[in-house]
Image: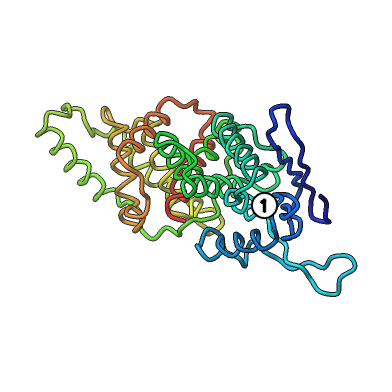
């Protein structure tokens, strides 16, 4: 079946499974009700009922997933539905063709979960990862709703759906394609050197009382912390070199962990001041970074190659932007 927006081809495998091959370029595939009747071999009234329920139950929004198009030999525009709607209807259809479609969709989901690189790389490059996240979320909801997976499978799908953005960040990190996030917040408050020293002293006293710090913890070497804090407030041409909270926080954490301004405790102090800076700029509660994530990030920075500095900075900023957007 073809139209000006795309093409869907159905064929049988040797095992009798129906495969749906979708050719996607810069636009998605759009099918009318009549084409879905042909696709699933069901009456138009059945397809129409499933379409109504998809939108009525809030699985998808009609406005963003349907559009009117003019077709040949007709004076009236017809409603066409995109690939998300086609998949949702396919899971609701009770017919041999619908069963074959569900088998196909489930197998494709499994392939995508096990082979994170199975998606068309050109499409990812063109559209970014928003489509991937939406597709995973849609398939996860649909599989849950139709009870097509075991309890163990549901647990896996919940993790995949919840952390879909994490997989995309990891892929872009692996390929050194992380960009500066668009969602950034202007910095309102700098870390004052004097107050910062008192905060580190309070942290030191607490750790000493618990037997978790040595006498060297927090001892500054040659005013290196003062230099780091000064660097965060550098200007160029009258503008802040690091203008956003995310940029300043990322560089603060990186510089303290990599430059070792203290005789002992650089990773812990770096993480502490990172959180303190976010708090003073009203982003700590929004950041969503838990203890384990912060520990992992500090260790990653400590082990990173200095040549990867810009990549590390972009990673921290993307994590912060992802939590607060």
When asked about the image quadrant of residue 204, the answer is top left
Give the residue at the far bottom of this rendering.
75
Depth order, front residue of 291/58: 58
Q: Position of residue 18 (x, y in %)?
A: 70, 37
Give the answer, above or below, for where 254 lies relative to 89.
above
Give the residue at the far right of this rendering.
73
Q: Position of residue 230 (x, y in %)?
A: 39, 47
How many numbered circles does the render carry? 1
Give the answer, above or below, for where 241 lies relative to 304.
below
Q: Position of residue 38 (x, y in %)?
A: 75, 52
Give the residue at x 50% y 43%. 164
Q: Residues within 10 Å of mark 1 (few under 14, many from 20)?
A: some
Give the residue at x 64% y 37%. 104
The colour scheme is rainbow
Depth order, front residue of 82/42: 42
Give the answer, above or below, for where 159 lies relative to 1.
above
Depth order, front residue of 149/38: 38
Does residue 217 appear to the left or right of 142 in the view shown?
left
Q: Position of residue 4 (x, y in %)?
A: 83, 56
Does residue 264 appear to the left or right of 163 in the view shown?
left
Depth order, front residue of 48/72: 48
Does residue 183 appear to the left or right of 286 in the view shown?
right
Name the residue beneath numbered marker 1.
Answer: 83
Does residue 171 appear to the left or right of 121 in the view shown?
left
Give the residue at the far left of this rendering.
209
When asked about the image quadrant of residue 44, the answer is bottom right
Secondary structure category for the residue under label 1: helix
């Amino acid at each position: 079946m073809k139209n000006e927006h795309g093409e869907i081809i159905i064929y049988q495998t040797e095992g009798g499974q129906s495969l749906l091959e979708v050719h996607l370029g810069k636009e998605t595939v759009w099918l009318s009700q009549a084409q879905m009747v042909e696709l699933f071999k069901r009456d138009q009234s059945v397809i129409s009922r499933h379409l109504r329920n998809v939108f009525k139950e809030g699985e998808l929004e009609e406005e963003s997933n349907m559009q009117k198009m003019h077709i040949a030999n007709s004076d009236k525009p017809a409603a066409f539905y995109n690939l998300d709607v086609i998949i949702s209807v396919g899971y609701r259809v009770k017919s041999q063709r619908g069963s074959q479609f569900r088998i196909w969709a489930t197998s494709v989901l499994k392939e995508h979960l096990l082979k994170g690189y199975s998606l068309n790389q050109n499409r990812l490059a063109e559209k970014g990862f928003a489509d991937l996240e939406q597709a995973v979320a849609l398939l996860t909801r649909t599989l849950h709703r139709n009870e097509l997976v075991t309890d163990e499978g549901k647990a896996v799908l919940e993790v995949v759906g919840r952390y879909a953005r994490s997989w995309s960040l990891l892929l872009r990190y692996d390929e050194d394609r992380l960009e500066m996030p668009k969602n950034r917040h202007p910095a309102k408050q700098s870390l004052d050197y004097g107050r910062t020293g008192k905060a580190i002293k309070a942290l030191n006293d607490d750790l000493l009382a618990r037997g978790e710090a040595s006498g060297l913890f927090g001892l500054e070497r040659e005013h290196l912390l003062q230099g780091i804090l000064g660097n965060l407030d550098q200007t160029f041409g009258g503008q802040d070199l690091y203008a956003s909270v995310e940029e300043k926080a990322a560089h603060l954490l990186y510089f303290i962990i990599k430059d070792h301004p203290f005789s002992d405790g650089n990773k812990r102090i770096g993480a502490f001041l990172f959180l303190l800076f976010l708090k003073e700029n009203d982003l700590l509660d929004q950041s969503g970074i838990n203890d384990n994530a912060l520990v992992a990030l500090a260790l990653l920075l400590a082990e990173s190659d200095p040549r990867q500095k810009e990549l590390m900075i972009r990673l921290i900023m993307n994590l912060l932007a992802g939590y607060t957007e």
